[in-house]
Amino acid sequence: MTQPTLHPDAVHAKVRTLPALPQAVIELRSALKREDVAVDELAATISHDQALTAKTLRLANSSFYGVAGRVSSIRGAINILGLRTVATVATTAVVISSFDRTACAGFDFDGFWRHALATAFCAQELAAATHMDGEAAFSAGLLHDIGRLALATYFPLELGQTLAWAAEHDVHAIEAERLMLNTDHAAVGGLIAEHWNFAPAIAEAIRCHHELPAHKSATLADLAHVADNMTHALDLSGLDEDMVPPLSLAAWERVALSPQQVQKIFERTERQAQSVRDSLTV
């Protein structure tokens, strides 16, 4: 089979065609940087965008938060979810709508988002165990594989052939991407993160969650990497071909979990993922 190698310029060009983030998301992210931000101001910003409002209310009303069907306003959703989670939901709604879920026949869009949600919750649990920023970890986990969405939308033939080759040869998809595409979804995701001006730590987590830089203490990239590995091991995406990626022992040692913490994170991640996995799908 001819290898469908991608040229770096073609990937960069496609990323540059992504639309800018909607004004509502830009204003929301900007407001979160201010110490004097008012909840009512953020609620009004989101409420002006119908799609973002719907996504936020769906997540706030999921069974995991124990208030199913009782949250009817963005103000109430912020009280339940927190400001940063609402901002992540808004950003993710934009990410979802920016890619064509039907472009690549071999790509399971729903399975992708089940995995993304599970990884977000797992990363948040890891952050709690390591005393790191839980909301930033949630964002990193939710968005860690956005590069694969870009590959599925803009290079569906190449990605489809790559996924088929990975399944045939029983290797993890990222190994097949590097061999056949001359890039991988993490690198493409890093380009998208830069295009949309994500926070540097989030961008690094997306770009490096399979190839971790050396650090003395745990980083968001470490949390995204370990969460990705854990959720694949739990098989929460529902994909028949799901394969656990290689685990970085250095990242595992930096996160430094006890067996009891691992068990608790497994249990909570499974429960959270099952209760809210439909909240962000389209």
Image (cartoon, rainbow, N blue to C red):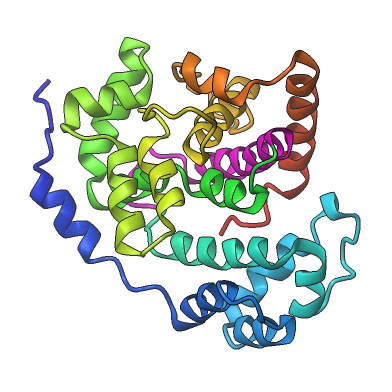
Above or below, 43 against 216 in this view is below
User: Toward the viewer: 273 or 143?
Assistant: 143
Residue 227 lies left or right of residue 57; in this view the side is left
How far across and down, in percent of the image, does residue 25 sit? 50, 75
Q: Looking at the picture, does residue 126 appear above or below residue 73?
A: above
Rendered-image quadrant of the N terminus: top left
**Residue 61, located in which quarter of the rendered image?**
bottom right
Q: Residue at x 48, y 49 (%)?
A: 143
Q: Based on the picture, tell me whether residue 107 belongs to the magenta stretch.
A: yes
Q: Is residue 247 visible?
A: no
| Horizontal arrangement in the rendering, residue 181 relative to residue 18 (left or right) | left
Horizontal side of 121 relative to 246 (left or right) equals right
Image position, residue 49 (x, y; %): 57, 83
Indicate the position of residue 34 as horizontal and vertical percent values. 58, 77
Q: Quadrant of the C terminus?
A: bottom right
Q: Residue at x 60, y 26 (%)?
A: 255
User: Can you tell which quarter of the image residue 184 is in?
Assistant: top left
Q: Residue at x 47, y 18 (%)?
A: 250
Residue 145 in picture, x, y percent from top left: 43, 42
Q: Does the segment drawn in magenta span residue 105?
A: yes
The region drawn magenta spans 102-130
Q: Can I make out residue 195 in this image?
A: yes
Q: Is residue 238 above or below residue 17?
A: above
User: Total label count?
Assistant: 0
In this rendering, would 112 be left or right of 180?
right
Residue that extends furthest to the top in the rendered view of this protein: 169
Our reading of the magenta stretch's main secondary structure is helix
Most distant residue in the front direction: 216
